[in-house]
């Protein structure tokens, strides 16, 4: 068999973003040997894309905020599909995790009193996003990286993990390869934490970078774990549309949080239309542009602009305006923050200003941005226990975007950064406990051989399918049929095409050898993307209602009965099986919190 190198760690953490680094800190604090695998370079994680802030109810802005309000906002924003226990843990612990980050050295913006400054965001009742200008994710990753690296982990950069290795007692390690030279590496571990992020790259227009191909979720599925809520893919309302070189690049929600407004192609501020205001939010937002303008000067007035509705609502409104023929010349809408003044914009949104000037010569202090929804985040993911982050596979844990349950049918902006802090820590602690009770087990040579054969097969074919061609076709069908508006007709056509692409992907061919070969790398990534695309489409077909990010034009109503079930996906042989799983009743103490919000 192909020779391979073997390395051993007590705990293997796959992914070096915020969740992975926070898990590593917990492992290292316990004195265990910790290995971190990064598909890219350390510090280049998708965490930096979360620019606007980390949501936690510190209550620094003279508003009656606390964890209960944060809990309620997250449940309502998630259209009641969330794991109640996960949200309770999250809302409680987010406060301590942000303050802990400050203790680690994070430099937050400040109030006049010297407290961490907080800004408003969509779906949050109060100003709750603790921020560093519009570079919060970058500051978070810098802070966690400095803390973790100072404690001495082993970091394997530019390694791609492609298979989890298991025994009848759970996970025992993983197969990886070095992206620079193609060396095969087998990593033995007593416990594994998946912190691999999302999978937006199967869509044509996305804010996600090249790494986001769903490796962790697909590997967990193949190892015996379930996925949950896979139909729930978040389309961020404001991705850049024009110029073409910037298509899909994220315009942070902080732009709207700092007063940015949306106008259609006729100049109308369309978010004030009654049809775009869900019943559950009526009375909580400004009724007119004049009232919204007053909010900029008096943020104690909580009736904020409707541009700060949750992301799923704003994305659908933009989509409907464009579909009705009221879009801009390039098929989007305008996002305008120029009225806030150049000095204010450069102070509060420095990254947006600098990035857009550099990439597209767009001066956001002097002209509106042309935007359209872009694929940004995945609410669904690996099914985990709320308290421990344990998957169905013993010794395997997951945290961050690759794990499902917390956000339900829609994530509120800012909840992602505190998600990775809260559950990254918990996953690390659980991995420590598991690793302390387990030993390194022998590796299955047959599992390694099967993965190596799959990895190297494209290099051995002189004739076959190009990964780039199939990847492009995958993006096209997902963009057209599984994006914001879905239907039985479109989803079944998408599923049929996916079956064809899966069959063709069995004949992938990559020219050249293993050294710095992007075509070869793409071949394995593509298999993960096809697997998860099928999970998304099958789940979207099964959920016959509209809820959160799932909008079925043939089932436009929200069905209360569907609000009582999550959909899980399991792998049986080579077939994906979608199952309805009842959502547990909300405990009385949490139901009381929800009832408080109705008064």
Image: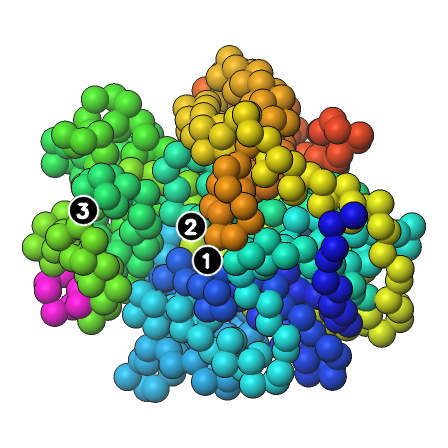
565 with respect to 105 (left or right): right
Residue 245: which quarter of the image? top left
215 with respect to 368 (left or right): right
Q: For mark 1, does the 10 Å Cα neighbourhood hold few (<14), some (14 to 19), or many (20 or more) residues?
A: many
Q: Nearer the viewer, residue 219 or 406?
A: 219
> Which residue is label 2 attached to?
209
> Which residue is label 3 attached to?
369
The residue sitting at 32% across, 86% down in the picture is 113
Q: Is residue 341 magenta?
A: yes
Query: Among all residues in the image, which is located at the extreme top?
Result: 489
Residue 387 — which label? none
Q: Is residue 8 magenta?
A: no
Magenta range: 338-346
In primary-sequence order, the first of circles 1 and 2 is 1
Marks 2, 3: nearer the viewer:
2
User: x, y percentage for residue 145?
Assistant: 51, 76
Q: Secondary structure at mark 3?
A: strand
The reply to whether residue 547 is in sight is: no
Q: Nearer the viewer, residue 575 or 545?
A: 575
The residue sitting at 71% across, 54% down in the picture is 175
In primary-sequence order, the first of circles 3 and 1 is 1
User: x, y percentage for residue 201?
Assistant: 46, 41
Residue 258: which quarter of the image? bottom left
Q: Are marks 1 and 2 in contact (CB under 8 Å)?
A: yes
> Which residue is label 1 attached to?
46
Q: For mark 3, does the 10 Å Cα neighbourhood hold few (<14), some (14 to 19), or many (20 or more) residues?
A: many
The residue sitting at 57% across, 45% down in the picture is 214
């Amino acid at each position: 068999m192909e020779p391979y190198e073997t390395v051993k760690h007590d705990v293997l953490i796959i992914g070096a973003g915020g969740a992975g680094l926070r898990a590593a800190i917990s492992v290292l604090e316990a004195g265990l040997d910790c290995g971190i695998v990064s598909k890219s370079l350390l510090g280049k994680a998708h965490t930096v894309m979360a620019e606007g802030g980390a949501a936690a109810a510190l209550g620094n802005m003279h508003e009656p905020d606390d964890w209960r309000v944060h809990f309620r906002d997250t449940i309502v924003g998630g259209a009641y599909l969330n794991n109640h226990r996960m949200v309770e843990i999250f809302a409680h612990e987010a406060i301590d995790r942000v303050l802990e980050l400050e203790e680690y050295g994070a430099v937050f913006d400040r109030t006049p009193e010297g407290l961490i400054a907080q800004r408003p965001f969509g779906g949050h009742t109060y100003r709750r996003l603790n921020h560093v200008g519009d570079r919060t994710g970058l500051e978070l990753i810098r802070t966690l990286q400095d803390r973790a690296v100072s404690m001495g982990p082993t970091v394997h950069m530019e390694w791609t993990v492609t298979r989890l290795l298991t025994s009848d007692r759970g996970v025992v390690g993983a197969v990886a390869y070095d992206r620079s030279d193609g060396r095969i590496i087998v990593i033995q571990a007593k416990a594994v934490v998946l912190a691999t992020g999302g999978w937006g790259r199967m869509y044509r227009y996305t804010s996600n970078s090249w790494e986001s191909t769903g490796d962790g979720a697909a590997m967990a599925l193949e190892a015996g774990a379930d996925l949950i809520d896979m139909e729930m893919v978040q389309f961020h309302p404001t991705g850049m549309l024009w110029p073409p070189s910037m298509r899909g690049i994220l315009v942070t929600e902080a732009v709207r949080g700092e007063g940015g407004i949306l106008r259609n192609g006729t100049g109308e501020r369309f978010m004030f239309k009654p049809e775009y205001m869900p019943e559950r939010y009526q009375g909580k937002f400004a009724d007119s542009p004049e009232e919204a303008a007053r909010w900029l000067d008096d943020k104690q007035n909580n009736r904020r602009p409707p541009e700060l509705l949750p992301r799923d609502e704003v994305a659908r409104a933009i989509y409907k305006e464009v579909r009705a023929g009221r879009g801009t010349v390039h098929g989007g809408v305008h996002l305008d923050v120029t009225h806030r003044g150049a000095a204010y914009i450069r102070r509060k949104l420095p990254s947006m200003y600098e990035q857009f000037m550099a990439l597209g010569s767009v001066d956001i202090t002097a002209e509106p941005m042309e935007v359209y929804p872009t694929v940004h985040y995945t609410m669904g993911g690996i099914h985990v226990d709320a308290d421990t982050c344990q998957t169905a596979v013993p010794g395997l844990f997951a945290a961050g975007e690759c794990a499902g349950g917390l956000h339900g049918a829609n994530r509120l902006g800012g909840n992602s950064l505190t998600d990775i802090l809260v559950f990254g820590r918990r996953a690390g602690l659980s991995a420590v406990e598991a690793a302390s009770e387990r030993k390194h087990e022998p590796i299955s040579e047959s599992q390694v051989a099967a993965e190596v054969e799959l990895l190297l097969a494209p290099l051995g074919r002189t004739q076959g399918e190009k990964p780039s061609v199939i990847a492009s076709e995958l993006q096209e069908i997902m963009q057209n049929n599984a994006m914001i508006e879905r239907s039985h007709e479109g989803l079944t056509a998408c599923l049929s095409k996916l079956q064809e692409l899966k069959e063709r992907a069995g004949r992938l061919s990559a020219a050249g050898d293993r050294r710095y070969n992007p075509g070869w790398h793409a071949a394995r990534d593509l298999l993960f993307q096809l697997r998860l695309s099928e999970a998304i489409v099958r789940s979207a077909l099964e959920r016959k209602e509209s809820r959160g990010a799932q909008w079925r034009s043939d089932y436009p109503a929200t069905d209360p009965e569907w609000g009582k079930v999550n959909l899980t996906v399991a792998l049986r042989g080579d077939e994906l099986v979608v199952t309805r799983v009842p959502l547990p009743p909300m405990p009385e103490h949490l139901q009381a919190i929800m009832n408080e919000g109705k008064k």
